[in-house]
Amino acid sequence: MLKSQYFLLLCAIYPGVSHARGKAYEEFDKGRHSAYRKDVFLTTKPFQRIVVGFVKDEEGMPLPGVEVRNLKTTEVAVTDGEGKFQIKASETDRIQFRLIGFATVEVAPKEAASVVLKAETSKLNEVVVVGYGVQKKGNIVGAVASAKFDETVSSRGLSNASSALQGLLPGLAVNQNSGMAGNNAAELMIRGLGTVNNAGPLIVVDGMPDVSLNRVNVNDIESVTVLKDAASAAVYGSRAANGVVLITTKSGKRNTKPAISFNSNLSLVRPTENVNFVSNYAKALTATQVAQSVNTLPNAFQFKNGTIDQWLAMSMIDPKRYPNTDWWDVVLRDGLGQNYNVSVNGGGDNSNYYLSFGALDERGIQIENNFNRYNLAFNLDTKVAKTIGSGIRFSGNWSQYKYNYTEGMTANSANGLDLFTAPAGILPYDPVTGYYGGAMAYNESSQATNAYADYMVRNRNNMNQKQANLNGYLDWKPIEGLVARVDYSLSYNNRFDWRADIPTQAYNFQADSFGPRIYVGSNEPIYNTDRENFKTQLNAKLSYDKTFGKSHVISATAIYSEEFWKDRYLSASRGTRLNPNIFEIDGALNDVQTTGGSSEMEGLRSYIGRLGYTFKDRYILEGTFRADGSSKFLPGDQYGYFPAGAFGWRLSEEPFIKPFLDKIKISSAKFRVTYGSLGNNSGVGRYEQQELLTAGHYFLDAAAVVGLVNKKFINYNLTWEKTNIFNLGLDVSMLNNKLLLELDYYNRKTIGMNRESDLSTHLSGVYIAPRRNIGDMSNKGFEANLTWNDKKGDFQYMVNLNYSTNKNTLLSWSETLQRGPLFVNMPYNFVYAFEAIGIAQTWEDVYKATPQGASPGDVLIKDLNGDGRIDANDRKAYPEYQLGRPTSNYALRGAASWKGFDVAVLLQGAYGRKEFWMNRVNSPFLGTANQAVTYEQLNQTWNLDNRNAEYPRLLPSGLGSTSTNNYLSTYWLQDLSYLRLKNVQLGYTFKNNLIQKIGVKKIRGYVSADNLVTFTKFKGLDPEKSTYANDSYPITKTFVFGLNFDF
Amino acid sequence: MAGCRKDLLNQNATVSPNSNTFWLTEADALSALMGNYSEFRPCFDRDYHFDGHGDFLKMYNTGAAPISITVNNPSSYGNGAAALYRELYGSINTSNYVIENIRARLLPNAKTAASKQNLEAIIGEARLLRGIAYFRLISLWGDVPYIYKVASAPIEVDTISRSSITKVKDSIYADFTYAAEKLPNKGAAIGRAGKPAALAFRGKLQLFWGSWKKNGWPELEGFQQSATEAKTAFEGAAADFNRVITEFGLNLFRGGAPGEWGEMGKADVLPNYYYMFIPSTGNLNADGEMLMVITHGGNATNQSEEYMRVWTGVSVGLSQNQAIPRYELADRYQSTITGDFLPKMVQMNPSTNSAARTTPNSSVNPESYRNRDYRMKASLLWDYEKIMGIGTTETTGFVAFLYKTWSGKITIDGVSYDAFNDNTTNLSGLQSRKFVRNYGGQNRSSGDYNWPLMRLADVFLMYAEATNEVNGPQADAIALVNRVRARGKLPALAASKTASKQAFFDAIEQERIVELFGEGQRAFDLRRWRAIEKVFGPAYGAGKWFQDSWGNNWERFFFNADELVYQRCYIYQIPEAERTRNKNLTQNKPWR
């Protein structure tokens, strides 16, 4: 019985695989001694006989557990492990066969000897990975969303799993911030910002928390599950407050021939949006004159008219000495991605395996930005004895990453000392001499940046990373229903960063001499940092599942878990290289060198229990409990307790509701309620609660001496940050299971967010503010997931619409809050803005407004409180909008196939976010030297001839602190709502005899495009990016061409 | 269920010692004192920032300084020092930690007299550091909260109120007195204070107290002007300074000899004064001029200074010219021939006047700078003066300074030199040489110069000032001022300069301007002398224009400024952010 259930599960997971079924069918056939026997109708009673029959599925597999009901007598029987049943019936009776996941069948007794139940094309039968186990979707009572990673995902040629999750699941907000090769992962957030501390979800890959999601080969991923409420996530206790993302990788199937699959794709990558720098240097200089004219006499302009005229004329005949460089063009190139994967899977009677190799090569759209990664995965499960199974999972990856700035184009600092300080009048590079150009124009600052040199010889960052994740398990099933399992996992990560910039000095081609600017000094050191982290986890699990009688199903699970982290780093540098092309430390003098090194450890011990009880398939009760002890806290405060309870009511199973639901074509409906609490310990440092002295060394007699400083106050009352979640859900399947609807409402309350307390300035000069449980926050929201699945002949299609919206409120804060975007009873980071009246066109406009030091061309600010002056009290709150992240996300997915063709579309959007968008691209404050000038600054700023300009008049950057143009006013506030065609793809599968003759089962060719079109009012680089400082790495548009071969 | 890994939940920190196993030995006491010095260091080793509030140095910004204060405006800065306020209390709390723990845990168990003496000396040093920090606090903010013990919980200081300046001054005096009694005659090492430092600071405290009492401090509520108290304070100051000068056999750097001027334009030979401010020579302190220094390590010690980065331009170690001497300083350097001021130089614009470079007494004619105070050559660059160029750390040969020329070559006597590049930041026509190394090997951020927190020349001048306040010009005081002048190769003061109390005071002020340029003294002098109006003009006046060597107006301060602007320079603002947390913390009058 148990075995066949597992088999069923397998069938449900892999409906397309027929090898195993064929074999089982043969076995079944051998024993079909009674199916067509004449003595089916026994004559024990007149009119009423015992009907004996078998129930099978469409593929001939016996179906146990089918409810067989005589509709007339209401007698009920259940099929056994071989699908056999007996029931009393008279010839005129009707017999009904019901099994969840199959269409109900009614037959006359004489037709009951052999009944075939057709599987419903329902998602309810899918098996979903949940914490420490799997569950049938139909039985899930928590707020769980899951998705399979099928071809539509792998065909996108994505380098990381996080961006593949976008638009897939309601309640999971996915935001991509950059298209940078090697750094294009998306940020995940479940159900809004849960805390002011780390609000990202816990990532669990194949049962192992803390594996980096973005280094898993997307092609190896089988499915992803998101645990959103307390009932489903409580088994992850102290780290589940922000939800859990479970990733499951592929495994092989028992009794299948080796199947080899080869996928390759090629992506062409383009930026979605560009920064338009003015490449005409002479023109750009006039912009600085315009800015300076506000408070400077023309004869004192930094750049003289003569310089500008000379440049304008000479650049046409001598572009080397009078260059007009378009830096965006220089630093950008066509991106290219290549992705190759080979996998083999199969299995014998007692074992199954999956083996895969992937190679990824990304050439970023920015010069000198490359990322390569190689992945290897090996999963093996084998039966050691009849009751003992074991398996190992190994996955390893190795990558090389080359980049300039962590965030791509610029250091993203407020002063943006890089791309935005590269004036057009600098020659990037002269191939004849091999020199990098520097400032040449009269009065151009020698500190002007050569962005090309910046990327080619300076900021040459390299990161090599290696990871290995190893997991082994042993399970023992001594008696039916009881499983004992031990898992041990090791996750190892090595990261080596090195940097060795190449000494370079700027060259002045006009003066034919090296200019004063040294891009990289001659004794630039070689830096190395080696980080080694490992984590181990031991899980011991005991579970018991049993059905008592006909209607009581109980399940119990107990788990003990130990997790241990150790991180170590070692760093060193040496100056004065023997030769600029030497990149290893020994190739430099050891007179000036630095070293560093340390390690950190952490332990977590957990006890987990789960109890489930189902009555008559109708009422589902589940209780979960986890106790976590963490080494981060002091003894006595180490343990946190996280209980949760869930109740599910499958109302479609209630006889008194069923007829009504049938009428409105609802085949199944389930109502879910859960409540529980989760924790978060991410805000607390590993040794933060320990009484330690801090190094503060000194120098005596020209030698270092040990100095120690007491900087610690320990808050002995510090406890876990807790999140209580109430979740209400409804799952409905209707119209012959073609339509699946899932609705969820949640109320999530985070209590005691811990944060460094506000410490008196009389102490904070030396003491580190101790952490305190400081505030509460609530997130309420609604999620909907609507899926339509249908088939008409050869044409199959699916449409999915998912939507989630969240309302964040800061409930309390135990310290004084100043006026600002953090306030009680308001969303965290709500929009708090001065109100702009508009740009003053005349002096009359200025005089009519409240005095604020404006001139025509400046933004006028409204005196909101009417006190006759403009100050911080004139700001207005917009609680319906928040900064940083949208309140609501939605996506529409569609997929269809017809004969060999398949097509898929993903539309994704968000709203509820506004930002003050003023950065170096559109800032009306212009530096007078070493300044890159953008199209916006030159052409879209206010002047008498351009009164309807987009932006206020240009001002010299020195006035930035006083001008109303610099206020965070509604003038700069932009709505970042957007809807984008995230992905569209088209494929064709060849599956004919011709290719099969040469040993290929099928070939699929496809094209796919990401981020093709975006509908938004936002004028900046991309509405999806999470920051708008001066990080100017665009999100990319990708065109993918791919081929898959299955052998 | 028992765990598989023992002590899984007891993970101890790996690089930091636990405070519960500390305070067992004298070595622990010393480590804690060194920790105190390291907290004290950033509060004082960038004192040149304060010169940005005076009239002879342009401070652009605080660059990479660990503690930022508003420095670039001599007329508005009193609210720009909240970080300094915080860090001074940081150092004070650290001192309290040292003092309290040695007293409670080590001193009662001291086994020998030598051990007791050592521990008391360490307490003495911690009290000296605490006193100096409070001295700075009262100088800027007047009444301040007085924290004298370790806070066991943050709440203990959350409702603290300000103590009157008199009470705080008395506590500082007690700290300095204890230090003066317990410290050895000579600091135990370069970087540790000895008795002369404690006495000099006690003297300075009394000198300042005397100045405040004499001149009044109207912005500080409740502060009573008193001539008698002032007199007592000046007498006390003079007595302490006198002990420093006479009891310890200290002498000026290199015996106070001027050294060699070298040749005009060249920098291979420079006067002795220059060498006092570069690490290789100045920090040896053989003669004992440096009564108290704040030490720095060099390359890769994480304890370096960045003076070169601040004090010069790109051509020297990629530096940033954050501090630029104002042109007005040039006329302050007296003639080595007459010993008196020379006629003011005439500012001439060489781009419009071809004779500007050759006209006698023209500001852009190098000859106008000849035969002046040797400290000028040691402190400044003017047109056609050279300085050693440095790449990142390697010397690149001499570069020539020429105002408003920041690239290309400058030919002097047929030899072509790279132009000194100031990246257009120099708007005065003068560059600093003081604090700029003339040798390679260290980059702009890895200097190892020990900042002079108290030096003998200052004590000489303070002694002269204190005695002059009590009794007018005294022979020994005049002699000391002349010793300071002698290092500039200036003749002794003419009789007219010591003829009256005021004349001698002016001579002392002049000497302080030139001798202590860039050392953070001028702004404190202006404030305690109540001389801001004297320098910048009265309220609602024209203010003061600063100009460059070409005669261009550069920037003007106090133009049409009302009284409040001046008042806010005389007393700083108690950090408002703290006042919103603590209702007991009152605000200074001009900031209410």
Image: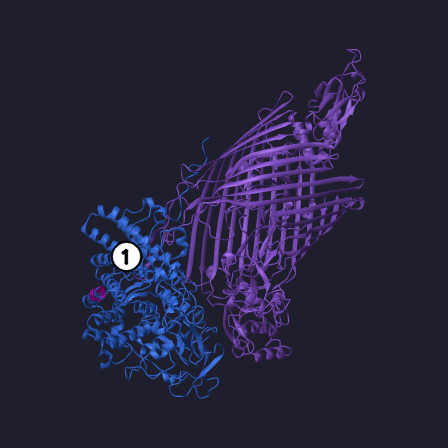
Query: Is residue B231 covered in magenta?
Result: yes
Q: Residue at x 70, y 35 (%)?
A: A733
Q: Residue at x 42, y 56 (%)?
A: A595
Residue A686 picture quarter: top left
Q: Is residue B58 visible?
A: yes
* Rendered image coloring scheme: by chain
Q: Residue furthest top?
A: A45
Q: Amino acid at mark 1?
A: Val
Q: In which quadrant is the C terminus of chain B drawn?
A: bottom left
Chain in blue, by letter, is B
Q: Is residue B362 left or right of residue A736?
A: left
Q: Is residue A43 left or right of residue A691?
A: right
Report x, y in % for residue A626. 51, 34
Relative to B356, say whether A741 is above or below.
above
Q: Which residue is mark 1?
A: B168
Q: Is residue B269 visible?
A: no
Name the foreground residue: A715 vs A359. Answer: A715
Secondary structure, mark 1, is helix
Report x, y in % for residue A808. 56, 45
Name the foreground residue: B28 vs A774. Answer: A774
Residue A55 picture quarter: top right
Magenta residues (range): B229-236
Q: Residue at x 66, y 54 (%)?
A: A338
Report x, y in % for residue B314. 45, 71
Chain A tint in image = purple
The subunit letter for the residue under badge 1 reads: B
Q: Is residue B411 left or right of residue A1017?
A: left
